[in-house]
Structure formats: structure tokens, C-alpha cells
Amino acid sequence: MMRIFCMLGLFALAAPVSQAGMVIDDFNGTTLGTRTFYVSSGGSTPNASATVNSGSAFATDVAFGQLTYTFASSMNLSPNYSFSLTDFEASGSGEISLVTRNTTGITGTETVTFTDGPPSDLSFVFDTVVLSDIKSLTFNMFSDPFGTPIDISFSSVQAVPEPTSIALVSLAGLGGLVVRRRRKVSEVAAV
């Protein structure tokens, strides 16, 4: 049992404590699955367009947009993962809903609102059940008020482990190392 705790501790200490996760799409050639990006204009501006190149996705004059990833084989993520649109920036406000699907249908939906401002990551947090056997991800983007054309951009789509999960594994491992150290010290003192 002690060896398991020590191995967990070494694993946790060796693992980088960062937000790095599995890249779904970096818009630079690395894409898991098949990507479809559709945008539609609102109001009197019928010029919506979507571009994917040089490490970013960019859409102009968007009232509604849909970004879908379809995977050839199911994706299973461990507990406490989230999906993230990194460096997200918008020229207005709205919301994005992420819909996950498996072979039997929709497994979950999470919605995040956004406003114009500096680039930041938008995270969609799901529970463990929703993140098993994922066959597709669909990001539905709406401007607010609906029909108002806005511009949006982001640099990648990622599956990211939540920091609390990393911290818990690290604490369990460190606890095992402390127990082992105390046993060694008590063994040496007894001799």
C-alpha cells in the first residue's frame, strides 16, 4: 500500500501542474476528428464568414455560429476535465453552448456567456458521466441580443484537467512520501 502512495507521489511530482491538456484543435494542422465550422449573419449584415488558419479560428459578422468535431473513435476523459476555447475574444456579447454526444444521443450541455474584453479562456465543465464515449462536440455560438453581428476568435480547443484534480493527486502522493519518511526515521531510531 505504501509503495502505491509513493508511486502516486512521484507521478504527481513529475507531472506538470499546468492547464495543459489534450488538444482537440490548434487550427494549425492538429485536429482530432473532423471539423465543421458554420456561421450565419444577423440583421442587415449578410456577410458572415469563418476562417481557420495560422493557429486561430476567426469569424466576422456572426449572429449564430456552429463549430462541430466528430471523432472516428470514442473519446473518454478521466474525472474533472473541462473543454476550453483558449484566448477567446469577442467584439460583443453572447453565449456559447457546448453539446456532447455519444452513440446514443446527447449526453450533456454546458453554456458559458461572454462579453467583449481582453482574450481569456472560456471553460465548459462537465461531470464524469458526460465525458465517457464522446463521439462529437458541438459549440453553438449566439450573439446577444440575438441577430447583432459580432466578431469572435480563439486559438485552440482543448480538453483540460481541472486544477483541483491535479492538487488532490499531488496531496495524496505527498502524504504517502511523508508516511514513508516517518517510518524510515522511526526504523533508524529503533536501531
Image (tube, rainbow, N blue to C red):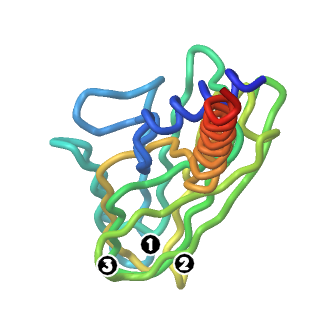
* Contact (Cβ within 8 Å) of mark 3 with mark 1: no
Residue 131 at what x, y percent from top left?
A: 71, 37
Name the amino acid, label 2: Phe
Is there a contact, CB below 8 Å, between mark 2 and mark 1? Answer: yes
Point out residue 174 in the picture as x, y percentages from the top left corner: 59, 44
Residue positioned 51% across, 30% down in the render: 10
In depth, the one of 105 and 11 nearer the eye is 11
Residue 48 falls in image quadrant: bottom left
Residue receiving disc 3: 91
Which image quarter holds the C terminus? top right
Does residue 176 show up?
A: no
The disc placed on residue 146 is 2
Q: Which residue is mark 1?
A: 42
* Residue 67 image position (x, y, % from top left): 48, 46
Instruction: Name the amino acid type tagged 1.
Output: Gly
- Quadrant of the image containing the N terminus: top right
Q: Nearer the viewer, mark 2 or mark 1?
A: 2
The residue nearer to you, when weighing 76 against 66, is 76
Looking at the rendered structure, the secondary structure element under dot 1 is loop
Depth check: give the residue in front, 135 or 15: 15
Above or below residue 109? Residue 60 is: below
